[in-house]
Amino acid sequence: MTETIGTTETTLADLMAGLAVSFHQPVPLAELLTTIVQAAQDAIPGVDHVGISLAHAQGRIETVGWTHSIVGSIDEVQYSLDEGPCVDAIRTRRQSWSNDLASDARWPRFGPQARLLGIESQMGVALFDEPSVVGSLNLYARAAGAFDEETPRVAAIFATHAAHALGRTLRLDQLNEALITRRTIGIAIGLVMARYQLDERRAFQFLIRTSQTGNVKLRTIAEQLIAEADRRSNSA
C-alpha cells in the first residue's frame, strides 16, 4: 500500500509540475482553470466530473471551471439551497464528501436533488483561502460508493498542486475575467457540439487543438466561432 501511495503522489506531483511548466508564459486564468479540472478528472480515481467554485468576500459563490455542463447545474442547486459538500468545504476549509448523497442526513434537501441530476457521490476539497476569495475543488461521480479510502488523500494532493499552479493570490478582476471567458468558451463548445455532432469533452478538445495549431488564444477562437454563428443567424 505504501508503494502505491508513493506512486500516486509522484504521478500527481509530476502531472501538476508539468501543468505549471506548460503555463510558464502568461495565460488567461480561465484556460488554467479548465486545464486543472480536466487533469483532476483524469487523475483522481472514481471521479466522473470536476468543477472549481469560488466564494467571494460578500458570500457569492460561482462556478468558474467545469468538465461538463452537469457541474454547473448541480452547483446551482447547492448554492440556492445553501447546502452540500461544495458549500461545506468552502465554509470549513476542509474536505466534505459523501458516497451516498441522497441518503446523507447532512444535506436533506440537496441530496435528493443531486440524485435527480444523476450524481450519487460528491467531494468538496478546499483549494485556497485568500482574503477576497475562497476556492473549492469539487468532484462528482454518477455511482454511489465511487470514492474509496484513497480518494480523499489523492484529492488533497491534487488540490495542493493545483493551488500552487494557480498561485497564492488571485485578484477579483482576474476572476471576473475568467468567468466571462469560461462562459464564452462554454458557448463555443455548444456550437462545436452541434456542428460536428461531438460530445462536450471532444468539442473542448477540438477547440484546444485549434488554439494550439493556430497559436491563438482559446478565448479568441471561441469569440470567432460565436461571431461566425451570429453572422449566419443574421443572414438567414
Image (cartoon, helix red, strand yellow):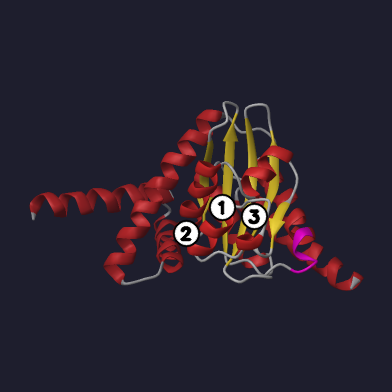
Q: Residue at x 64, y 45 (%)?
A: 136
Q: Which callout, 1 or 3, points at the residue further toward the start of the chain?
A: 3
Residue type pointed to by label 3: Leu
Q: Which callout, 2 or 1, points at the residue further toward the start of the chain?
A: 2
Query: Is residue 207 positioned above or below 202 on the image?
Result: above
Q: Which residue is mark 1?
A: 110
Residue type pointed to by label 2: Ile
Q: On residue 230, which mark appears?
A: none
| Camera-nearest residue between 54 and 39 | 54
| Camera-nearest residue between 72 and 121 | 121
What span is in magenta? 148-152
CB within 8 Å, label 3 to label 2: no
Residue 194, x across and y down, in percent: 29, 66
Residue 196, x across and y down, in percent: 30, 70
Q: Which residue is mark 2?
A: 70
Give the spatial CA distance, label 1 vs label 3: 34 Å
Disc 2 on helix, strand or loop? Answer: helix
Query: Is residue 26 positioned above or below 120 on the image?
Result: above
The reply, left or right, for residue 45 in relation to residue 81 is right
Residue 197, x across and y down, in percent: 31, 72
CB within 8 Å, label 1 to label 3: no
Q: Which callout, 3 or 2, points at the residue further toward the start of the chain?
A: 3
Kindly report which numbered mark, 3 or 2, lies closer to the viewer in this rendering. Answer: 2
Residue 122, x across and y down, in percent: 63, 59
Q: Which residue is mark 3?
A: 19
Taking the image as drawn, is residue 29 in sight? no
Query: Is residue 192 positioned above or below 223 on the image?
Result: below
